[in-house]
Amino acid sequence: MTTTHAPQNLVTSISDTPVPSPTTSDNAPNYLRLRGLSKSFGDTPVFQNIDADIVQGEFVTLLGPSGCGKSTLLRAIAGLTDIDAGEIEVDGEIITRLPPQKRDIGMVFQHYALFPNMSVRDNVAFGLRMRRVAPRSRRERVEETLALVELGDHAHKYPHQLSGGQRQRVALARSLVTRPRILLMDEPLSALDAKIRQHLRDQIREIQQQLALTTLFVTHDQEEALMLSDRIFLMGQGRILQQSDAESLYTRPASAEVAEFVGAYNRLDARAARRLLGQHVDGRKLALRPEALYLMEENGQGYLPPNPGPACTGLIVKRQLLGNVIRYRVDCDGMTLNVDTLNRGRRFLRPEGSQVVVYADVDEARVL
Amino acid sequence: MSSNADRRRSATGGGLPLHWWILAPIFVSLSLPLAATLLYALATRWGATLLPDGLTLDWMLRLWHTPRFLEAFGRSMFVVASSLLLSLVLILPVAFLARTRFPWLERWMDVLVLTPFAVPPVVSSVGLLQLYAGGPLPLVGTPWILIFTYVSIALPFMYRSLINSLRGFDAAELMDAAQLLGASPLVAFLRVVLPNMRLGIRIAVFLSFSFLIGEFVFANLLVGTRFETLQIYLFNVRRESGHFTSALVITLFLFILILTWLGNGRSEVAAPKDRNR
Amino acid sequence: MIRGHRWSPALLCLLPFALVFCAFQLAPLGYVALSAFRVGTGWGFDHFREIAASTFYRQAMWRSIEIALVSSLAGLLIATLACYGLSRVGGGTRRVLIAFTNMTSNFAGVPLAFAFIILLGANGALTLALQRFGLFESFSLYSRTGLMIIYTWFQVPLGMLLLLPAFAGLRSEWREAASLLGAGRVAYWRHIGLPVLWPSMMGTLTILLANAIGTYATVFALVGNNYNLLTIRIANLVSGDLFLQPELASALSLITIALLTAMTLVQQHLLRGRTHVE
């Protein structure tokens, strides 16, 4: 997964300027507050002691492997799953004990959950009908919202007549039309084809920013999380392992677990760290992303990192093409390293079995 | 999920949840006739009291010493087993060919198998009685007409089970593979396809069996007392000793139950594969 | 093997089945259709005219429709409630109850009639029990009410087995989505649950109606020829001891089939344009 975005992040990490994010500024009030949320099914804990604050208009992604409790957390916020302990607060109001009907929270489901007996228009109008909005303004808002998701022409159709992407846009419109305080999205893109997924992903982000919707988005897809979010909450084993913006999550994992999930990190022991970084770290491990390692020809051709460590000569034992990135496995002084380089073209390919010199970017090494 | 259950429980305020107030009366009513018959079959004497005086297995055992019952049992088994064998021989090739060679046949059969459901047995009997009372095929009054009629009314059960079983694997591909390896079509069918259908055949046979053994209308109208099957026998003795007849009803019912269970229970084992599709 | 070749020797394997099915399923039906119009040595509508003119046959028709409608509607209602109840019961219990339903749906015809005599006959266990409490004094199993009870009893399990898949098709996400959009339990069932179930309920109703109209064994074992229904009349005209009138039976049979067809058509009409099943 690191493949497609490695180059981009390489650039940002070199420039080393944090991505500006207006919504995470300190003076904005917390809109959604989670305090000590815990939940177990029988003896199995699903999530424990979750604390989180989300600012109004922020797009937060809950990222994690399947079974980490992220979907259950989302359902708990929606009120579809009871929690054992903790408190949920929206806009200063504690909603922990409210039934879902009264929470004023919108949700988009993985498999759309469109009502099959209703046309697109009726599906979207449903929430307004339940809120007893007058027919005239109901109609207006439905048209408006359908236009927003570019489905104005399909209002009369039934869900089974729509494609997956269209269905999910109807589901999005249905949850937007009531102007909920918070929009929850439970893996809304994972049932769709790659092409449609990308398009809808961009559309979701656009609409979210346009409406300044506080959004909590669940996914197991790192690429999605990195591209969409103001902030990412990485979940694992029922806990939030790291809360940060995409760039920091990717380049500065807070723990070995995070590093494990985020990318094909090279993990360096003390000896390897000394060899590659020229630094002494006692007992602790270091993580180094594959694109923070640079390859030079023996004749000195190639790029040097901004802050190179000691040179280390090695042998390419394997070469994998990952698309726009080439991953080399280099045997280097008894270490096996993954090195990613941009696929610039044939002339730059290095054959397996060739000698290379590896330099690490010292600034990018993370202590775990 | 469990949390929804929690909320439901708390919503009804501790007592019996709403759905049990619905389910309990319905299932009690459904079980009453069966329970009463079972109790009657096991009661020594059950006069004008709410509950019987004592329990005994005498009635159930006496059944198996009654020649008339045993004869009726034998006749039923003969008729049902013959029709099952015949319908298997007739329908198996149809299902196989519909699945592997003639898609048009599958579409036709889907409609055709509905006719035995759509036409009430009484109506079919009217035609059967007139067609086969005399003429070149005087079958009325003999078990033969029952056997042939049963083949046609067992069709939906037979065909559905067989075709479902055939849909569970790619029979056409297996046939091709076997023939490429040198088997003749017949050998390929017998040695490759048929073993894969064992389960489907078993389900088909058990379901049809339990359906046919309970058949009364045709038996009564086409053959009647001239060939007393179990259902006819039960009909004829329904006014005699309540206990004895109860024992007969329960025995018959248990028999049917075990057969359906063998059919369904087996299909349950095979089901997970299907569910994933 | 050449596929798609329509006239291959393999077709011969279909012949025995085709013969038996034609001779014992289609031919009798065709015979009925013809002999209904057979008058003496000619053809005509005489039998239908006779039926239309006879209060006796009109009563049989009317009573068949009446008992079919009452027992099917009651059966459908109870089955729907039972399925709703079952949808809220967890795994093990649910499986036991469904197995039990399956079991009762196999209990039909003569054994069923007998069981009801044991239970609700003049000296039936339940009759006696209820009479002790002063209830049910004038109840008779062999009356119209009694027959309606027994019909409804066997319609319920059948209706349940037909409806259960539809209930299983109700996705929990619909309820969840509805609740997030502000719908309570009642609103959910009114706007989503029942409308989604509607086609299956109509289909089930049609099958229950057909089942009731075609029922013969249970009534015959219970009251013999003493309750005037279409099936009883037909059977009596071809197997009674005297006055066999097979042509008249054929005409009544055709009327029965016409009734069933009409019901199916009504159902299809009601469901027109409702093909929204996912």
Image (cartoon, coloured by chain):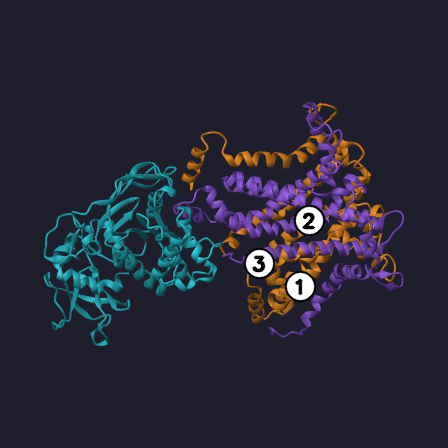
Chain colours: A cyan, B orange, C purple
Whether label 2 touches label 1, CB < 8 Å: no
Chain identifier of the residue bearing label 2 in the image? C
> Mark 2, mark 3: which one is toward the viewer?
3
Q: Position of residue A221 (x, y in %)?
A: 31, 56
Residues beneath discs 2 and 1 located on the same chain: no
Quadrant of the rendered image containing residue B194: bottom right
Taking B25 as reference, is B183 above or below it? below
**Regarding mark 2 in the picture, which secondary structure is present there?**
helix
Looking at the picture, which amino acid does disc 1 mark?
Answer: Pro
The answer for how far apart the CA atoms under marks 2 and 1 are is 31 Å
Which residue is tagged 1? B93
- First in sequence, mark 2 or 3: give its number: 2
Can you give x and y, in whole percent of width and height, for residue B172 in the image? Answer: 57, 67
**Residue at image location 56% in from the left, 65% down from the top:** B174
Question: Which residue in the protein does label 3 denote?
Answer: C272
Within 10 angstroms of label 1, few (less than 14), some, or many (20 or more) residues?
some
Residue A129 lies, in percent from the top left, at: 42, 49
Q: What residue is rendered at 56% in x and 39% in y?
A: C96
Q: Label 2 to label 3, Cα distance in Å?
A: 23 Å
Do residues under tags 1 and 3 come within 8 Å of each other at their CB atoms? Answer: no
Q: Is label 3 in a helix, a strand or a loop? A: loop
In depth, the one of C95 and B190 nearer the eye is: C95
**Residue A86 horizontal side relative to residue B51, left or right:** left
